[in-house]
Image (cartoon, rainbow, N blue to C red):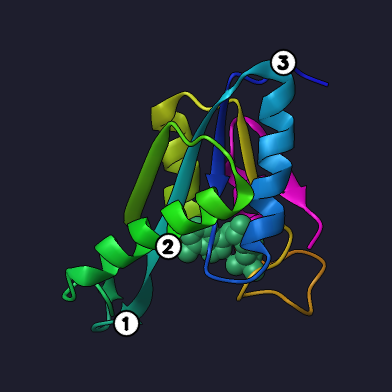
Amino acid sequence: MANYKNILVAVDYTEEAHKVLAKAKAMAAGTGAKITLLHVVETVPVVGGPESFSYVDLYVDQPDVIDRALSDMKTLAAAIGVNIDNFLVLTGVPKHEITSCADEQGVDLIVLGSHGRHGIRLILGSTAAGVLHHAKCDVLAVRV
Ligand code: AMP
């Protein structure tokens, strides 16, 4: 197994997040890797005119959404019994935010679920597939 030092774990609000974080905990235990836990508050793309294309965030106007995401991630980490070095909540399109966050943080492994809310009937969900395509580091898609 590679000697990962800096692991980014991306979690949504599905039940599978427990399995994803437990796997990252096991990966980090062997190497003493630092773990960053990330949730992306989703934005949705809208067509605003013939040549414009932008993103509308359905949630960002509600400041407590960020706080709630942080609090939910802390509860999840406590349930798994894993030490998290950095909790992050970003807003945007999950696959983009996950890959750019990994670049900025110098991550050497991204851990996410093979499926979440966007892909229960597919081989890989859309976030998982997008991250696998665009990430510059290794990606572990935990079978959920
Ligand atoms: P999906 O491909 O969207 O079905 O989700 C696959 C995996 O991507 C999930 O199990 C999570 O690990 C991750 N993921 C999906 N949405 C988000 C999100 N909004 N924030 C962080 N991680 C996410």
Check whether the beta carbons of the residues at disc 1 and disc 3 lie within 8 A of each other. no
Residue to which mark 3 is pinned = 3
- Which residues are the magenta region? 128-144
Q: Amino acid at mark 1?
A: Val
Mark 1: which secondary structure?
strand
Foreground: 5 or 106? 5
Foreground: 80 or 125? 80
Q: Earlier in the sequence, mark 1 or mark 2?
A: 1
Give how far across and how far down residue 86 sits, in percent. Answer: 39, 36
Q: Which image quarter has ligand 1? A: bottom right
Foreground: 10 or 100? 10
Give how far across and how far down residue 15 sits, in percent. Answer: 65, 70
Foreground: 134 or 18? 18
Q: Which dot, 2 or 3, sits closer to the camera? A: 2
Instruction: Specify whether residue 102 is in view.
Output: yes
At 27% from the left and 76% from the top, the residue drawn is 59
Q: Earlier in the sequence, mark 2 or mark 3?
A: 3
Q: Which mark is residue 47?
A: 1
Q: Residues within 10 Å of mark 3 (few under 14, many from 20)?
A: few
Mark 2: which secondary structure?
helix
The quadrant of the image that shows the N terminus is: top right
Q: Residues within 10 Å of mark 2 (few under 14, many from 20)?
A: some
Give how far across and how far down residue 68 sits, in percent. Answer: 32, 66
| Mark 2 CB within 8 Å of ligand 1 | no
Mark 3: which secondary structure?
loop
Residue to which mark 2 is pinned = 72
Give how far across and how far down residue 17 sits, in percent. Answer: 62, 60
